[in-house]
């Protein structure tokens, strides 16, 4: 009998140890680290290929294998200049990401083209609508219908951005520079309708899609969310930030402090959903590099090692401030014969995760996904 008791105890302890070890592994890196892979389908259609250890790899599988947990995908309303970034294209990407066990952050641009602080141009389908209530209904119905269609194909995202880099007023007829100050009553009313659409969809389907409001650069975040709070714009779960150091006056420590302030002031989770850093300043095609000469920081040269070090230190700063994740913008935007609105090739190949000088071989920066970040309680 004692032998059986001893065997039972041994098996119990072994199981407990395995469970603890598994839990420890899960806790060791509980952060949402990932990449925006919106361009991948287009690049592959243009002949683009991705390599790891000289072997061709499916990029979605490679990112998952390297530790990416989340994929961000942009969605335009009805672009007439591209067949990508449409709902059909996004569905294809979601299938690929989910097939590799990565979560989805769906980025509604609410525009037919790039939406950013300088451009929040209303989709052509809604142009001319001046009644805020009617426009809000259009935004609500569109958001809900997209989620409904994705749900019907088992492609529901885990996270949704209601707008992209919405520093300026959304759904405007002209670029930001041609508009006056933000009409916050209108702006908040429209954003609330987008947020409400996701909330109502969750309740109808028994889901818990998390909602995010995304502002470019920590420099403007405090003022933006203070203005939002004055309009009772608070029914969402996540604050998303873009952080590109060459366009920000904040260093990594100030980024961390801002994240801590936003998290504690508004009781929201915080994530950096866009960032990037060059591994070289060389231009490999006819498309100019967005991150050109002068976009590096002291201590982080434009090199393979500098890119990796920046991403590890950036992520550590986000975690220090209580942030929950970091997503690298267009990590797979390699150079191909594809044309953009501004040139042929990629404007980001010198900041991607693949070495353009070495046959698009995976760069060391992939290690930022699996780095053992210290957990800091806030």
Image (cartoon, rainbow, N blue to C red):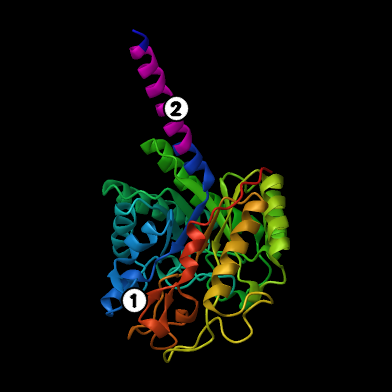
Image point 70% across, 45% down: which residue?
264
Answer whether residue 9 is magenta in the image: yes
The N terminus lies in which quarter of the figure? Answer: top left
What is the crowding at mark 2: few (fewer than 14 residues within 10 Å), some, or many (at least 20)? few
Quadrant of the image occupied by residue 353: bottom left
Image vertical order of residue 315 relative to residue 236, above or below:
below
Q: List x then y, in percent, for residue 328.
A: 50, 65
Q: List x then y, in percent, for residue 340.
A: 40, 83
Q: List x then y, in percent, for residue 36.
A: 44, 64
**SS for callout 1:** loop
Highlighted range, magenta: 3-21
| 350 left or right, relative to 90 | right
Foreground pick, 61 / 244: 61
What is the crowding at mark 1: few (fewer than 14 residues within 10 Å), some, or many (at least 20)? some
Q: Residue furthest front?
A: 3
Count the marks: 2
Foreground pick, 163 / 288: 288
Foreground pick, 59 / 7: 7
Quadrant of the image occupied by residue 138: bottom left
Q: Which residue lies under the disc numbered 2?
A: 16
Q: Main secondary structure of the magenta part?
A: helix
**SS for callout 2:** helix
Q: Earlier in the sequence, mark 2 or mark 1?
A: 2
| 95 left or right, relative to 15 | left
Image point 45% across, 63% down: which residue?
35
Answer whether residue 15 is magenta in the image: yes
Image vertical order of residue 243 relative to residue 293, above or below:
above
Disc number placed over residue 82 in the picture, else none: 1
Image point 38% across, 71% down: which residue?
39
Q: Is residue 270 visible?
A: yes
Spatial distance from mark 2 to mark 1, Cα to Cα? Answer: 54 Å
């Amino acid at each position: 009998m004692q032998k059986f008791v001893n065997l039972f105890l041994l098996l119990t302890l072994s199981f407990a140890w395995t469970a603890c070890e598994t839990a420890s592994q899960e806790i060791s890196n509980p952060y949402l680290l990932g990449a925006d892979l919106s361009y991948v389908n287009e690049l592959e259609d243009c002949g683009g290929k991705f390599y790891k250890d000289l072997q061709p790899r499916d990029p979605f599988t490679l990112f998952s294998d390297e530790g990416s947990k989340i994929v961000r995908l942009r969605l335009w309303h009805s672009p007439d200049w591209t067949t990508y970034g449409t709902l059909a294209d996004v569905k294809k990407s979601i299938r690929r990401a989910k097939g590799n066990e990565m979560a989805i952050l769906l980025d509604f641009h609410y525009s037919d083209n790039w939406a950013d602080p300088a451009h929040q141009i209303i989709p052509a389908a809604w142009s001319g609508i001046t009644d805020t209530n009617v426009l809000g209904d259009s935004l609500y119905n569109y958001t809900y219908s997209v989620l409904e269609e994705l749900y019907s194909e088992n492609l529901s995202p885990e996270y949704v951005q209601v707008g992209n880099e919405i520093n300026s007023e959304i759904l405007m007829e002209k670029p930001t520079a041609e508009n006056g100050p933000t009409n916050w009553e209108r702006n908040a009313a429209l954003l609330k309708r987008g947020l409400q659409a996701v909330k109502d969809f969750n309740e109808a389907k028994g889901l818990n899609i998390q909602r995010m409001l995304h502002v470019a650069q920590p420099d403007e975040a405090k003022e933006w969310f203070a203005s939002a709070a004055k309009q009772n714009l608070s029914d969402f779960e996540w604050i998303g930030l873009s952080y590109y150091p060459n366009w920000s006056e904040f260093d990594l420590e100030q980024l961390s402090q801002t994240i801590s302030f936003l998290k504690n002031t508004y009781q929201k989770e915080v994530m950096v959903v866009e960032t990037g850093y060059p591994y070289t300043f060389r231009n490999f095609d006819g498309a100019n590099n967005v991150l050109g000469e002068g976009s590096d920081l002291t201590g982080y040269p434009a090199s393979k090692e500098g890119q990796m070090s920046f991403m590890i230190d950036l992520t550590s700063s986000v975690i220090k401030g209580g942030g929950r994740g970091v997503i690298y913008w267009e990590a797979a935007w390699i150079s191909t014969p594809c044309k953009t609105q501004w040139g042929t090739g990629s404007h980001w190949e010198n900041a991607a995760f693949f070495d353009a000088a070495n046959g698009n071989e995976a760069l060391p920066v992939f290690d930022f996904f699996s780095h053992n970040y210290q957990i800091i309680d806030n």
